[in-house]
Image: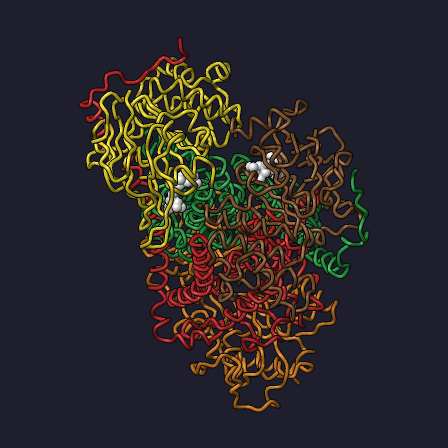
Chain colours: A brown, B yellow, C red, D orange, E green
Amino acid sequence: MTEVRALNVDDTLSDDIVVDDNRVVMDVEDVSVYYGDFRAVRDVHMPVREHEITAMIGPSGCGKSTMLRSLNRMNDLIEGARVEGRITYQGIDLYGPKVDPVEVRRRIGMVFQKPNPFPKSIEENITFGPRIAGVPKSEFPELVERSLRSAAIWDEVKDRLKDSALGLSGGQQQRLCIARAIATTPDVLLMDEPCSALDPIATGRIEDLMQQLKDDYTIVIVTHNMQQAARVSDRCAFFTTEIDATNDRRTGQLVEYDRTDKIFSNPADERTENYVTGRFG
Amino acid sequence: MTEVRALNVDDTLSDDIVVDDNRVVMDVEDVSVYYGDFRAVRDVHMPVREHEITAMIGPSGCGKSTMLRSLNRMNDLIEGARVEGRITYQGIDLYGPKVDPVEVRRRIGMVFQKPNPFPKSIEENITFGPRIAGVPKSEFPELVERSLRSAAIWDEVKDRLKDSALGLSGGQQQRLCIARAIATTPDVLLMDEPCSALDPIATGRIEDLMQQLKDDYTIVIVTHNMQQAARVSDRCAFFTTEIDATNDRRTGQLVEYDRTDKIFSNPADERTENYVTGRFG
Amino acid sequence: MTLISPMVDKDKTAERVRARIESGGRDPKDIGFRWLMLATLLFSLLVLAVLVVDVVGDSWSVLSSRLGDFLANPLRSRSDEAGVFTGLRGTFWIGIFVICLSFPIGIGAAIYLEEYATDSWFTRLVDVNIRNLAGVPSVVYGILGFTIFVGLLDGPFGEDGAFGKTTVAGGLTLAVLSLPVVIITSAEAIRAVPQSLREAGYGVGATKWEVVRNHVLPYAAPGILTGTLLSLARALGEAAPLILVGAIRGRLGSNAGFFELGQLREQFTAMPILITEYATKPGDDWVPVTAAAIVILLLVVLGFNAVAVLLRNRFEAKREGK
Amino acid sequence: GGSDDSSDGASGSGSADAGECGEGSISASGSSTVEPITTRAAELYEDVCGDIQITVDGPGTGDGFALFCTGETDISDASRQIKDSEAEECAANGIEYTELLVAFDGIAVLTNPNNSAVDCLSFVDLYALLGGESDGFDTWAAGSDLGAGLGSDVAPYPDAELFISAPGTESGTYDSFIEIVLEGVAEESQGEEAPAGFIRTDFAGNAADNVIIEGIAGNDTSLGWVGFAFAVENTDIVKTLAITEEPGGACVEPTIETIADSSYPVSRGLYIYVNNDKLTSNSALAPFVEFYLGDAYTEAVTEAFGPDAGYVPLPDDLKAETDAAFAGAAG
Amino acid sequence: MAAPVMPADPDLLAGNPKRRQKESIVKTVFAGAATTSLVISILIVGSLLWKAQSFVGDLISPPADALAETRDGMISLSNLWTEQWAPRFMQFDIKTLLVASVIVTVVAMAVAGPVGLGAAVYLSEYASPRVRRILKPILEVLAGIPSVVLGFFALRWIGPNIVQNLFDSAGNQSLLAAGLGVGLLTIPLVASISEDAMRSVPNALREASAGLGARKFTTSTRVVLPAAVSGLVAAFIVATSRAIGETMVVFLAAGGSGNSAQFTVNPLERGATMTAAMASQASGTDGTIVETAFNSLFFVGAVLFVITLTLNVIADRFVRRVRQQY
Ligand SMILES: Nc1ncnc2c1ncn2[C@@H]1O[C@H](COP(=O)(O)OP(=O)(O)OP(=O)(O)O)[C@@H](O)[C@H]1O
Ligand SMILES: Nc1ncnc2c1ncn2[C@@H]1O[C@H](COP(=O)(O)OP(=O)(O)OP(=O)(O)O)[C@@H](O)[C@H]1O
Ligand SMILES: [Mg+2]
Ligand SMILES: [Mg+2]
């Protein structure tokens, strides 16, 4: 694979895509996200490639979660949240008129910072998504096993599928949440700091799991932990905040988006360098 | 100064104190802290030396805050919290029968993770402590200026002392809280992640301030940020958690306590090394 | 050079420090205040305990000698025959109205406000309106009941001779009275559902209703149940609106059984009205009767209250324990 | 009483068959004073015709007639005779009715047992203390001049607080007291128009008779009035005053006898009005009224408030007139 | 070169129309439920105004039957400002009712304010979680005691045992006895809202205070109470509004149930509050067969409604302020 040129937020990304990279499955073009009047993050360009892990890093409040949640219209649920610019999935404008956000979320699954299993049985956690999507009940047993296997938790729970998911440990719960997301047959998985509530061992397992999952899914992950970004991701977007002169509030922005090794070894922007070397944050 | 030997949790600390180190102002000997039946942290030995910054680091839940709050009997406020072992200040057992915890807290001040100014004027925030301690009103003007100067915030607020403290920025609020703590003339300052709610610039200012303050005060700081610990502290205690075999809950413990440069360059314990090199957490 | 001019107690000899720290000091003001506050709390509990003891004591002669009679007999003009049957029956049916009308409508409105409504003038209006309705005195709801439910619904929902002052009118009035409280408490319970649970639902492609039905409502159910039970209890203890709606204080002719539907179109009475009537009857022999009726109403109302509060505590404890 | 079996009203343990009881339900409304009698009769009727539902309400005589004259009720209880205006309303709606005198109710004038200064008052004295011209008098003595001017032989009254405990304006007892005691003196004193009114209005009336009695008992120099039936129950805590119509006349204590023979001057008749059309259209009505005036009569009247107290039954001649009136209406 | 992604099936993300339709039906149903509250408000205001305006109209141009009941053959708006409340005589002195309401409310709040606040301070600041777990529910259960019960208690117990014992001149019923009864009724309300307000003060402030060497007394009075002041004011106003609107206690224990009352400022005397006047007007009308007199009920209701509404709006302001703060 050839090296891509370090991106500059002012460039148009599509010009920079190199042919033998993986196909772009989601594209973020010139996107700003607002909460009411407040622009939380601005001018983001970020193509997401198939079967890659794309990481978003940056200091707290720089809009990583905001950006991530725009990718599957999860932000629709927040009063006043608004996306400007274009986000596409398989070439379809996610915010286009004929798009049903419910369907978007089915195809672009999400895993959250704090494991959030439903307070129901392990099995019901998995089958909820398929059930509401109209998958026939007869397929459930196979589907449950497949999802749990994919999330590398089948062996741990196969004898207690009817037990409450709340009885699982934090790391198990997080893998269950991944399994639950997988069960609706998405092809992109968004993960917002999926390990930050977990201990080192559970973290390790999730990281391993992500590596396995990327064969079948495209993954976008937000993390606070730079080492984690360096370990797991193929591509890395560094965000930071800057005071918006017009209203004196901090707006997040994409500083640099590039291959992970490049970001960590030879970043193009000084701010990125300061951050990845731990000068602040 | 000569190097102190790396401490081992099983040693008795007093034997290891080297003469030309600063005087030990607080000593933690064989301390465990419980919440009800749950032992949150166990077997801590940790002498705190005058005019030094002692940092406590470790993964979430390892008992850093618990330990810190035991140092000025702040944990008394939590139902069921209980200290075993001996914590001394100037040689006095803090948990001795005749000790007035209120007086302890006046002498061992505390700064919290989230800036928590009273919803009153800046001035009243500062004078609250002295007033209840019976300092005559006539001394207030000088005391306010002195405290605010010590906390390096005087210039920013001197024209608005009567304004509400809630109008200050997060970083200013945190410095105000430090000024407020200083105003009761403590000689130890405990700080629980004082910068974690702040942006990099505000963080930088607080770190500078700590360096200035250590000429007059002894500081114990909890931080999540290893770079911060490395930057500001003289001595560093690394805690971690381990499953307590008896009850299957995680108990925190002190892994290593030593000079900061030693902890970060040449730790004695492998777990410390894993942690400081970012292998997890 | 530095900004810092230290004010550390330079004179900190170990002895002085020890003396101050080991002063042991319990401040008398501190202790006095604590006891004063405790006294106020105990006072309020004590007065109410006196009330209960007093009432139970007064009622004893009736409850111990003729409880069965007392429950089976209607509003009567002689103290040794008087009972609470018709009152209980009316209160039961009023409860049914509250449960069947204000619960579903109230919970529906709460779901709308918490889950569906966007921040629009309409939502704000409804919101402000509900909070104000909750503060409207119950006697004013009586006026509503009198003009609307008694006056306008006389024809369709009232039998001849009931003058519109029917169980339907009473039930509707109290259903309307409890609606705002049901909405507010249900909305609170729904608001307490962790956002993460909703996100989990939406994240796997559920529609709003699917999330609400499968996740929000089950989670909020204990809270909703608590709130609705409390508002039910409040409605069952209300007398003022029923006085305006014309609950019977003399003799209630209806000898319909407890569960007969026909009585909905007949005149009615209810426990609090019956107590008001008994309380204003002349003669000391009515005191035990009144007290006994009060004990029975208290059992019903405080029973609902206690169940609600226990339920909530149970679920809260469960949630926190998790 | 005949109903100490625990009948809940639904048992229908009647000894008579449906033919005698008729079918339907009966509603009575009107005076809260008469309501206990009608209620008691209805309660007793349960043993005879348990399936007949009889509702009795007591909002007041006026309200009762308002309903009665639009044909909504079968029976109207009244503590006075129907007013002309009410009769016109009935006529306008084509309602014909029969007036049945059922009992007497004395009104007892009360003070506190500790008040030994007065034992007997005349109408004039009562007017001087309670009439329209006494507005604002807060001692007994304040009425002295007025009383003396009207010929009282008791004035001057004691110089003590005048604490009034009396029925509220909504009650029939209040109206009767005005009508019987005050109206005549007022017209004499103020002229036909009675610009100052018949009764002073500056006291808080009360709806609950026991509360009125407790008010009397709670103040050493209280004055008030209440239905005789309530007063006799409480002679241990209140003192009934003897009354004379004219100053200097014979003082009469209220008792069952003195009320029945009309020698006690403050008494009134209690009535029920029965809708004539309903007597035929509602087959349950006539048997009930018959029972009311027949089997139930004595017990309902005398025991309306329990075995020891009650209203005063009609003397035989008046009772015969009532029976005859009903017989005529029922055809 | 960029790989221009060809749009896949444009309906790929169109979703299931059936589910969307169900969603919109459900939403409409719930919106309808929320709208009923508006309908109720409109009905309340409508039913108050309808007859209240006809009452005021009657005062301006009195009908004959109303004139016949008066002493001087005169009715005007000034009948709203005389010395007594006696609808039967066309005396509609609204200040008699207002002042009685104020007396009852002041007495009630003088009891419920400090006692409720003290109980709240104890529960929020001193009680251990275990004690709070026991006491708070008891207090809440007691909040459910129906007001007829407290009315009976005020009449039978507070009046004779407390008021008449303390004040010789007091009758068996008095505004004071009713006020005390209403006060008892509102204690749990004040305690509960105040406790919520104090508990919503972030623990960080308590810690800050304790960290500076403050005792609990100081923390409670100088930090927690001032920080919670909006909530406490709200609690007080809400309770005041409740006390003004309380009916049965006053109806039974204040002595004004006979639908006539004198203007008085003496709490030891009998009197009728707005609510008691409404209840007695509605429960017995022998004397007031005149429509005008009966309609005074709606006029009083409208006045009561405006007063409580104003109080509630003010209380809401304070509650909002609490929310904004933390
Ligand atoms: N629901 C919301 N309404 C208004 N502003 C919001 C909302 N959520 C986030 N913000 C603001 O948007 C900005 C970006 O927030 P976001 O949560 O995306 O940051 P982040 O990079 O994920 O931070 P963290 O690392 O702390 O999770 C912040 O200033 C935040 O205060
Ligand atoms: N009030 C409390 N009651 C019971 N357990 C507590 C309480 N506070 C803390 N704990 C438990 O004690 C342990 C140590 O908590 P502590 O807050 O001291 O950790 P920490 O190292 O400060 O973590 P963090 O970095 O997240 O602040 C944890 O298991 C925590 O759940
Ligand atoms: Mg985030
Ligand atoms: Mg901590």
Residue D159 appears left or right of A263: left
Residue A258 appears left or right of A156: right
For ligand 4, give the image quadrant.
top left
- Give the image location of residue D24, x and y in percent: 64, 81
Say if E315 sits above or below C199 in the image: above
Counting labels gives: 0
Of residues C138 and C287, the one drawn nearer to the viewer in this rendering = C138
| Residue at the outermost front position | A1
Q: Is residue E104 visible?
A: yes
State which quadrant residue C241 falls in.
bottom right
- Give the image location of residue E14, x and y in percent: 78, 54
Say if A75 sits above or below A59 in the image: below
- Give the image location of residue A62, x and y in percent: 60, 33
Residue E125 appears left or right of C162: left
| Residue at the outermost left position | C15
State which quadrant residue C208 falls in.
bottom right
- Give the image location of residue B243, x and y in percent: 36, 50
Query: Which quadrant of the rendered structure holds the N terminus of chain E?
Result: top right
